[in-house]
Each structure stands twice: as structure tokens, then as C-alpha cells.
Amino acid sequence: MQSIQRVLVSLSTYRWTSLGALVSLLLLTIANAVTPQLFRWGIDRGITEKNLEVVLISAGWMVVAAIARGLFNFGQSYLAEAASQGVAYDLRNKIFSKIQNLSFSYHDQAQTSQLLTRVTSDIEQIRTFVGTSLIQVIGGLVTLVSIAVILLVMNWKLALITLTVVPLTGWLMARFVTGNNRLFRQVQEQLSDLNAVLQENLIGIRVVKAFVRESTERSRYTTLNDNLVKANIKTISAIRNTFPFIFLLSNLVTLAVFAYGGAEVVENRFSIGELVAFNSYLALILQPILVIGFAAPAIAQSAASAERVYEVVDAEIEIRDRPDAIPFDTCGGRITFENVSFRYPGASAETLKEVSFETKPNELIAVLGMTGSGKSTIMNLIARFYDVTKGAIRIDGRDVRSFNLKSLRSRIGIVFQETTLFSGTIRENISYAKPNATLEEVIEVAKSAQIHDFIISLPDGYETIVGERGVGLSGGQKQRIAIARTLLTDYSILILDDSTSAVDARTAAQIQAELDGFMRQKACTTFVVAQRISTVKNADRIFVMDKGRLVAQGTHEELMQTSPLYGVILESQVQQKENK
């Protein structure tokens, strides 16, 4: 229950709201405790003695007590809900901020659906616990203690009979919560798996339809949906195996109180008013036991959800600033790889193996290689999305790990191989890294990326809304928007990771011609993961990668003379061009 304890500690942020809920709860308990005494007084002093004035006075005070109960019940419910919404708000912000800071290695292994479930369903479970279940449990405990004291004062023998139900019910509740925590966690995990299939299907709906796999996807979703239902049925079975015993105990105690109390009344050791009041208190003491019983499944589910949420909150951030990190302000252009080896987390083989090279200022480097040779990995290591397994990467002689991450990445302009656009306007997507950019600046980089003419042909121009993930735009159009977005940043190092793969050769040549000016003007060093011969020929130096190793480097002419692999790669590209 450590995770639940952490949730309770988080309530300290809303201490006054929580305190107000507790005060309202205590006043509600007092109002509930006074009501049976008013009944006793009205019966014994009013009805039994036929005193109409006492009956009217007791009835009036009962009305006052009823109004007080309504007000205090509203107060404790409202304030508890306000505190729970605050805790949920803080947790959502905390987990979202943590997701933003977690390293690529975490996101490589974590399922998006799992994260979505934790941010939504799991936090909602915690909110329900804080706003409803917690106040019910506290109210139940306070009521149990106060009513137990009153019963003992009224008739200690009858009270002992009544209170036997408390430890027995408590034992059943503790057994239920501790024995079924894993079961409730399983329900949340099954829900995450179901969300994973739904998310994949929504993203890949075009692929599903293209390969006529609708029935297969329905079957896959139905199977996981069945698993979720079965897990929920198990929780119902667990509840069924516990709560009938609680109800049985409460009924037996009611019967015992009626029998013993009735005998006491017959023998004039107990008044009718006291028996009525005692019966009312019996209902009051059994009600919180049942409320706590019904809250137990919610507490168990909340404990499982809290554990899942804090797993993300407590996840280790592998790539972080060193205590003595310095800002990355200037770039001379000398980027050095010193015997760099790298293995992705969870992978069995190294992706890079003892790669060494050094760039010169203002040099344009093209990186070439077969699929899986490690080209993109080199780009990711420069921006320190991952840290090297062995060796070192230096910029102007300083290890990249010595730089402040924010300043390092803000000075590296990168266009990823996989284009990502956000919901919003085209202008907002281009100015994503520089929100205060003027329209003139946005238009300038759009022209360089050869996307300006297309944008102004749209009815709303740069204010055109981009659909989810860029739906409605072609792959080439999305790539050119991504290029414009990068060109607008204040970069010193430019990395283009196969950034024109979805663009036709003519447009790619135009983009390349425009980029050459940007590269020479702003970037101290430019890396281009290239697939086209035209890009390769324009490079100052070409790196040829093969199975994670740097096997050759030089100009186009030099590599044509010395590297058989380079010749094979270019020949395959020529054949692809001819086939098209």
C-alpha cells in the first residue's frame, strides 16, 4: 500500500480543502449521533408520558438535525471532490512532464497504450479513491468509534454483542484487499492491451483495409475484450466470496440485539426509547461497515492504479544533465567520434562498433549504407538522444555529455526519417520550435523547402488546419514541412536523416540546391543520411557504413576508386531510378 500512502501525502498540497472535508465529516457524524437520542427523548419523555410539548420539541430538533446532516454531507462531498480533482490534476501534470523528460530508450520499450491508460484510467481510479472511497472509509471509522462509545455508555452488554461484527468484518476486508491487489492490477493491464490494439488499428486503418484484414483485427480485438471481461468477472467473484459473509454477520447481530434488547425491555431494565435509539445506532454502526466493505474493491483497484502511475513517475531518466554541465553556445565544426560503440537497450548485438572519425568546420558529410547499417544511430548519438555504450563523442574537443541537454539540442537542427506533424495550422507546425517567428520568416523557410507554392494554393494558406498526424498531406508534403520547421531553428549543426525520401527527384534537387546555401551559411557541420546520388556527389566527404562499422570515407571520386561497397550501393540506386 506504499503507493496509496504517496497519494495521501500528495493531499498535503490541498490541506485546507482536505481539512474542511474532515471538519464537515465530523459535524455530520455528530448530527447522526444526536438524532437517535432525540428519538429516545421523544419516545420516553413525550409519547410514553403523553407530553405533546416534548414530542413537538424533539420533532423540531430532528428537523434541525436533518438540515444539518444535509449541509454537512454536501460540504464533505464537495470539498473531498475538490481535493481529489486537485490530486488528479497534479498527477496528470507530473506524469506528462515525466514522459516529456524520459529518454528515447524508455519510449522504445514502453507501449503508448500503457502510458495512455495510466494517464487516463489509472489516474481516474485514484481520483475516485480520494474523492469518494477515502472519505467513506474515514467517515466509517469515525462513525464506528463514536457510536461504539455511545453504545457502551447506554448498555455495555448489548454493545459488546453489537461490536463483535467489527473485528470480523475488518478481518474479511483486510483479507479481500491484500488477496486481490494483483487481480485488480491485471484488470488495468488487460485494459491497456485492449487500448493498444485499438490505437494500432486506428493508426493503421489504411493498411488494414488495403490487405482486407478487418475480420482478423475484429477477432484480435474481441479476444482481448473477452480477456478483459474474464478479468472483471474474477473481481466480481472475489467480491461475491467476501460480501455475503459481511451481510450475514450484520443480520445476525441485528437479530441478537432485537432478542436481547427486547428481553431487557420486558424486564424493565431498558426503556422502549432506549431500544429504538439502540436500534438506530445499530443501523449507524452497520452502515459504515458496509460502506467500508463496498469501498474495499475501489481501494484495491486504486492501489493497483497508483502503483502503475508511480512506476512511470519513478522511472529513471537515463539521459540527463551532469551537475557541472555547461551551455553549448558556439560550434567550431569539429565533431569527433572516438571508438564509439553502441547497443540499444534490450538489444543483444551492437548497432555501432568502434566508429571513429572527425569532421572539419563547415563540412558537409553524407552518410551512406544499407538498411540497418547504423546511419540513423550516428545522428541520434550526436544529439544525445542516447549515450554511447563505449567511447566518446566530442564537439570542439568537449564530450557531448558535458553540455547542457537543452542548449545542445536547441542548437542541433534535425529532420527525422519519420515525419511527425501536430494538429494545428501549417504555420504552427513550421514555427513549432520558434513560436514567435514572423510570417515572413515562415515563408522564407517554406520556400527553401519547396513547399510555399503548395501552401498558398490552399484556401486558407498558412492557416490551413493539418489533420491528425498530417492526414490530408502526402508524404513528400509532410517531409517538406518538417524541413522548413528545422530550417527555422537556430541550429549550429544540421542533421538531415533521409529527409527527402518521399519527394520526387526533381523537387529533391531543388530542395538540395536551397539547402546548400543554408548549410554553408549557418551550420558549422552538416550530416546528411542520403539515398540519392546527387546528394552524395555534393558532399565534402562521404561515410560508408556497413553492419555498424565505418568501412570507408572520402569524396565521391575517391570512393569510386577504393570502395566496392560504395559502388554496389550507387549501382543499386541507378537501377532503381531506371526501373522507375
Image (cartoon, rainbow, N blue to C red):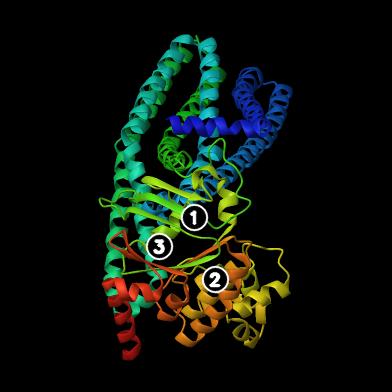
Q: Nearer the viewer, residue 470 or 6?
A: 470
- Are the residues at dot 3 and dot 2 in contact (C-beta closer than 8 Å)? no
x 47%, y 10%: residue: 156
Q: In this view, does 133 lie to the left or right of 217?
A: right
Q: Label 1 to label 3, Cα distance in Å?
A: 16 Å
Q: Label 2 to label 1, Cα distance in Å?
A: 25 Å
Location of residue 560 by image quarter? bottom left
Q: What element carries label 2?
A: helix
The residue singled out by tag 3 in the image is 376
Q: Is residue 377 left or right of residue 520?
A: left
The residue singled out by tag 1 in the image is 335
x 32%, y 39%: residue: 182
Q: Label 3 to label 2, Cα distance in Å?
A: 17 Å
Q: Is residue 376 above or below residue 444?
A: above
Amino acid found under the numbered disc labelled 1: Ile
The answer to which of marks 2 and 1 sits earlier in the sequence is 1
